[in-house]
Each structure stands twice: as structure tokens, then as C-alpha cells.
Image (cartoon, rainbow, N blue to C red):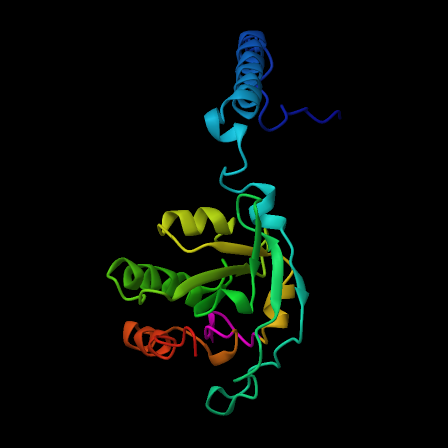
Amino acid sequence: MTPTSRPSRGSPPRGTPTRSRTPWLVAGGLAVVVLVALAVALAVGGGGDDDDNNTSIGNDHATTGTVVASGTPLPLLTDAADDPAVGMTFPTLTGVDQSGEPMTISADDGPAMILFAAHWCPHCQREVPVVQQWVDDGGLPSGVKLLTVSTAIDPQRPNYPPDAWLAREGWTSPVLVDADGTAATAAGLPAYPYFVAVDADGKVVQRTSGEQSTDQLDAIAGELVGTAGS
């Protein structure tokens, strides 16, 4: 006895008229073509004036720039209360800023507070707005610079790209791009965020890591006030 065949699952029963799918396929194909054309148009001409310069968010300079470090590197910070780097000359860090312009941080920049921050670090994400508000409120003393090193840049980690993050926070400090961590190593960075205070003679006065309150920022900056010409 021949088994009775059954319609396959998902197929219409035998004898049931089927609707042509051609109009749907054509419509779907047109939609794909339109989307592709739109994407190409945006990629080619949608950037506006930002595409005509090197300051667009997420540009190569801001995400791949590297540093050449010269001079004696600072030892890894292990104890801020007994830091052998205090009194050492800060090394010279040469590279580019987030727009691709040449930038150097060196002993000649003192008195200065140098902040090392990683875009993916949650502590840095909390600290950056605190520091910027402190600056906006007049906390940074006259004659003392605030310089930034954007380090450990990784497109596979959160909050990328770093220049977009800093732009959202209204960051006003000059930023040296340290994609591969060369500058961080030369400065003896143990963890993020990381501050190095350098006096007018280019000597390290203090190093500390972790989130700092505005009172702690006041204390770090206070050590640098009046050091010019010392």
C-alpha cells in the first residue's frame, strides 16, 4: 500500500493557488539598492566640512598616533608616599595631538599636571568630567598647565573613539595621542587615571593614580604654584 504523501511543513496544501512572490522580490531588491546608494552617498559626501580637515571625530590621528619617548624613563609607580621618581626630570614625549598636529610634552612644560587616561577605563570616564568641571570653576591655578595623554587606545574596547568621548565632555586640555602606551610606560604608569605633577624645572613633584576629588586636585596643583623660577 503506497503511503499517502503529506504536504511539507511551511508549503501550501496541494491544489491551493499560490501568490506570486515576484512583486515582493522586486520591491525588496529596490529597497536594497536604495540603502546601498544612501550609504555610499553618506560615505562620500555626508561628512560636510569635517572631511576637509583633520579634526573630524574618530580620525586616524586621534586613534593611531604613537609617541617617541626620550630621556630617562620614570620607574613604575608602586608607592605614592615613597616615590623614587620625585626629583627626576620628566621624559620628553613627542607625537601628535588628536588633530594630527605635532605635540610634545616635556620638562619644559612645567609647572604642569599631566593626566594619562584610557577611553575604556570606567575610572577615567568618571574622572574626566570632574577634572573639566574643576578647570571650568577656576581650580587650575594661573601659570599651571593641564596636559593630557590619551593612551591604551583600543577599537575593540568600550567608549571608542577617545576623541569623541573627550569632545562629549567638553575637554579643553591639549591631548597627546599614545595609542600603543609608549608614553604611559615612560611615565611609569601603574593604573588609570594617572597624574604626574611636574614643576617649572621639569622635575617630578608628585605622582598618583586613581580618581581624584577636587580637593585632591587642589592639593596637587598647590604643590606647583610658585615653582616658576625656583
Q: Nearer the viewer, residue 223 or 51?
A: 223
Residue 157 visible from this viewpoint: no
Q: Residue at x 57, y 11 (%)?
A: 21
Task: Decide whether the magenta segment is chiefly helix, strand or loop.
Answer: loop
Residue 146 visible from this viewpoint: yes
Q: Residue 130, position in %: x, y?
A: 32, 64
Q: Quarter of the image containing the N terminus?
A: top right
Magenta run includes residue 195: yes
Q: Residue 82, position in %: x, y?
A: 50, 92
Left or right, 176 with respect to 210, comes to right
Q: On the image, which quarter does residue 41 sit in?
A: top right
Q: On the image, which quarter does residue 15 sit in?
A: top right
Q: Residue at x 35, y 50 (%)?
A: 170
Q: Nearer the viewer, residue 96 or 43?
A: 96
Left or right, 96 with respect to 81, comes to right
Q: Nearer the viewer, residue 9 or 39?
A: 39
Q: Is residue 29 above or below residue 120?
A: above
Q: Is residue 197 above or below residue 3?
A: below
The residue stretch that appears in magenta: 189-201
Left or right, 47 with respect to 94, comes to left
Q: Is residue 148 above or below residue 90?
A: above
Q: Residue at x 59, y 76 (%)?
A: 188
